[in-house]
Amino acid sequence: MSNDLFTPIRLGRTELQNRIVMAPLTRNRAAMPGNVPQDINVTYYTQRATAGLLIAEATPISPMAHGYPATPGIHTAEQVAGWNKVVAAVHAKGGKIYLQLWHVGRISHPSLLPDNAIPVAPSAIKPAGQAYTFTGLQDFVTPRALGLDEIPALLEDYRRAAELALEAGFDGVEVHAANGYLIDQFLRDGTNQRQDQYGGSIANRSRLLLEVVATVSKVWGADRVGVRLSPINQFNDIRDSNPQALFNHVVEVLAPFKLAYLHVVEIGMSNDAPQAFDFNELRRAWQGNYMANGGYDKARGNAAIASGHAECVAYGVPFIANPDLVERFLADAPLNVPDQSSFYGGTEQGYTDYPRLT
Ligand code: PHB
């Protein structure tokens, strides 16, 4: 019999009881001020602990890494204590949980940053669109290009966040290199017009990602580190002239790390016409564990695993509305309908009150 979503698997050092992964989901429900994980977050993750792996929401690594209201951070002692409660409760249920390390780069706004700072980016190129701020939508501003002499401090922020995640008890960390945030801004030629060793060639644009992965792997061991990429996503006004060449290279240079997994968002989240991209080519270039994400249901998830396209599948929106998604897939039970209006911010409503199967 071939493998399916319910076949256990080992990703690096982490044993998963099934291959149904909860994707990282921004829900904007941390305690403010302080961006601290709180009791409703403990309840939310614990309700979903039967997933083979939970990837906790995108989590800013430093005060400058924030770009949305009420996202939990991983740069203060209070945040570590809050995350520790989440992790302990998930572990008590037999679950596994990674933390996604996030820097938004230019997808921010001075009102969300210390001393109204200008957001940082590879180059001073303003994104089209608006930031979600505490007072509603406001136009993005032109970011400030990070100086070459500032890269070591950025890597130090990643190192420290990785150490704090270890202290909080997580099973591993995922480097967020997707969806138009800082590392993706370095990868793409639409946002990276640097003249130094972090810009220009594909190898140079990939340098920051590799240095972050090396830094974080030094803390965790690469067998407890995953990387998330989104080759065709144009969300957050991100562009590249040749994503296939770029991401084929990225996968080739990530291979020697022997990461726990590569997590690939295979769809776009914007309304832009999708760029041509062959995900099978990317998969063939990657010998390690491949986690597929983007619009999968149970049947397509099983098919992706049976065909060898993916070792595991990450589900986002289905996990918002179905805390017991694993049990529902097992029983072929109908799924709850997600309420979009409560995705980002709010209370328990639309967060911890979706019903389980009875
Ligand atoms: C969002 O807040 O909409 C968001 C955050 C992180 C992502 C994608 C979307 O990777």
Image: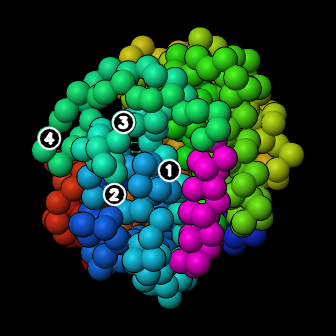
160 falls in the magenta region: yes
Q: Which residue is denoted by mark 3 in the rendering?
A: 118
Q: Which residue is denoted by mark 1 in the rendering?
A: 102
Q: Is mark 1 within 8 Å of ligand 1?
A: yes
User: Dot 1: few (<14), some (14–19), or many (≥20) neighbours within 10 Å?
Assistant: many
Whole-Å distance between the Cαs marked 4 and 1? Answer: 22 Å
Label 3: which secondary element: loop
**Prevailing secondary structure class for the magenta stretch in the rendered image:** helix
Of residue 18 and residue 286, the one placed in the foreground of this image is: 286
Give coordinates of residue 204: x percent, y percent. Answer: 73, 26
Label 1: which secondary element: strand
The amino acid marked with disc number 3 is Ile
Give coordinates of residue 248: x percent, y percent. Answer: 74, 26
Residue 334: tell me if it is visible: no
The amino acid marked with disc number 4 is Gly
Up-down relation of residue 221 to residue 24 (above or below)? below
Q: What is the quadrant of residue 140 in the picture?
A: top left
Name the residue at the right extreme: 256
Q: What is the quadrant of residue 158 in the picture?
A: bottom right
Of the image marks 4 and 2, the number of the one nearer the N terminus: 2
- Whether residues under marks 1 and 3 lie with C-beta atoms below 8 angstroms apart, the answer is no
- Whether residues under marks 2 and 1 lie with C-beta atoms below 8 angstroms apart, the answer is yes
The amino acid marked with disc number 1 is Trp
For the record, the magenta segment spans: 151-171
Label 4: which secondary element: strand
Of the image marks 2 and 1, the number of the one nearer the N terminus: 2
Give coordinates of residue 293: x percent, y percent. Answer: 53, 43
Q: Which residue is denoted by mark 2 in the rendering?
A: 71
